[in-house]
Image: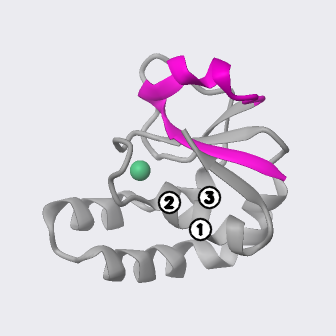
Amino acid sequence: MKLFVSNYASQHKFARFDVQRRVRISRGKDRLERFDTSVIELAPSRRLLEHYRRGDMDENEYALKYWEEVDPVWRLAVGRLRDGDCLLCFCPVGSPCHRLLVAARLRKEGHQVIEI
Ligand SMILES: [Zn+2]
């Protein structure tokens, strides 16, 4: 599959790419409803995200904990993705967040993933 990762605020850039569906992968819902569907299984728990944002753990520990949560549902979640989906959360471009962890794993599994 060809997939994209981005954040809700970057949607003005989507026209340049062939984004088919905007897929929410964050617990928080975008207020402006800038998504078509949700694959909430790929979102970190609120608890984990709070700890990470508070600085209780570094990126590596966050990644470990994230995969502890998501590994059991990974297959199910990926099975719900379609060609042209863009996975969305709130984090600014370039910040270490779960959408980049997801992108890296999808690439490892043979998918093309473009960061917008
Ligand atoms: Zn994020």
| 108 is higher (above) or lower (below) than 96 | below
- Where does the magenta region start and end? 1-20
Mark 3 lies on residue: 41
Which is more N-terminal, label 1 or label 3? 3
Q: How many marks?
A: 3
Where is residue 32 drawn, in percent x and y? Answer: 46, 16
Residue occupying image coordinates x 34% and y 81%: 60
Residue occupying image coordinates x 46% and y 73%: 66
Q: CA distance from mark 2 to mark 3?
A: 15 Å
Mark 1 lies on residue: 104
Mark 2 lies on residue: 100
Q: Are there few (<14), some (14-19), or many (20+) residues within 10 Å of tag 2?
A: some
| Disc nearest the viewer among 2 and 3 | 2
Question: Would you say residue 33 is visible in this rendering?
Answer: no
Label 3, secondary structure: give it. helix
Label 1, secondary structure: give it. helix
C-beta proximity under 8 Å, tags 1 and 2:
yes
